[in-house]
Amino acid sequence: MNALRTPDDRFGALPDFPYAPHYVEVDDGEGGRLRVHHLDEGSPDAPAVLLMHGEPSWCFLYRKMIPVLVDAGLRAVAPDLVGFGRSDKPDAQDDYTYARHVEWMRAALFDQLDLRDLTLVGQDWGGLIGLRLVAENPDRFARVVAANTGLPTGDQKMSDAFLAWQKYSQETPAFHVGGIVRGGCTSELAPEVVAAYDAPFPDDSFTAGARRFPMLVPTSPDDPAAPANREAWAALTAWEKPLLTAFSDKDPVTAGFDQVLQAAVPGAQRQPHTVIEGGGHFLQEDKGEQLARVVVDFVRTT
């Protein structure tokens, strides 16, 4: 596996991002090692909130939430998935599988950081991976906040819009990450914010992971990830620890999946589920402080 590493100077002028980088190493699955980046803010003894980003962003997405969480006495841990942010980026799309993403995060968060009693906040692929981690390592988690995410098994028909997104990810000559994030927001992003989302990708050779993610979403019952996701659903339908949905009202990508979680997960019963008004798919960007306050209240009351 040949992995690229984004030069540090690409991250030298990020707006409102005064956070120090932290790194661990994990096995790449082929005999090599990958460096995984994460933020770690707040007291190491405080209850930890695991902030997991998705496609095609990185932990910069959580910059508005981290101060609210830390000021409330919580620890904020925000990893960059392999292929994103300051984490290493294998340069072949075939290097990325759903199972490897789950294992890379498990190894980083549990084997290396030994995180426990976690509150998961998962958005987009942060939920597709995070909910698998919850299902497969339930003793590591105290509660879950699901935000604009899902856990598809390939048994449901995907929308034409999603299939078009898959096609775009494979065929577009230039994968404009900052523009994709901007298009998934309701707020107007400043040029320097768009540039921050582009920062991890100096050129298209760095985008293999971002291009691959749409193809890893299970879209048929015989998808390689479908059996593991069905097993995860079996675990989640027995999950009695608290689970809260905090979806936005202007995300056509994941609309309705909050209701699926509310109905299927025992721990979601009688929770103060909320809809973040005015937020797009990247609700951390549009309504980050508000989502952070929802998380703080949930941790305090459960």
Image (spheres, rainbow, N blue to C red):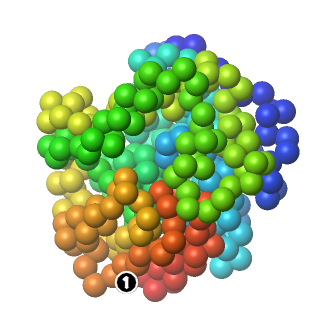
Image quarter for residue 263? bottom left
Report the front residue among 84 and 169: 169
**Which residue is tagged 1?**
272
Q: Position of residue 160 (x, y in %)?
A: 27, 41
Location of the C terminus by quadrant is bottom left
Residue drawn at the location 23% of the way across and 37% of the way down:
219
Residue drawn at the location 62% of the way across and 62% of the way down:
187
Q: Is residue 120 left or right of residue 236?
A: right
Answer yes or no: is residue 163 visible.
Answer: yes
Q: Position of residue 2 (x, y in %)?
A: 57, 13
Residue drawn at the location 24% of the way across and 59% of the way down:
236
Q: Position of residue 207 (x, y in %)?
A: 57, 26
Q: Position of residue 226 (x, y in %)?
A: 21, 37
Q: Is residue 260 left or right of residue 82?
A: left
Is 36 placed above or below 48 here? above
Is 29 placed above or below 157 here? above
Q: Is residue 212 left or right of residue 216?
A: right
Q: How many discs appear?
A: 1
Of helix, strand and loop, which one carries label 1?
loop
Report the front residue among 227 and 26: 227
Residue drawn at the location 29% of the way across and 61% of the way down:
257
Q: Amino acid at mark 1?
A: Pro
Answer yes or no: is residue 90 visible.
Answer: no
Image quarter for residue 16? bottom right
Is 107 placed above or below 135 here? above
Other-residue count near label 1 (Cα within 10 Å), few / some / many at <14 / 14–19 / ≥20? few
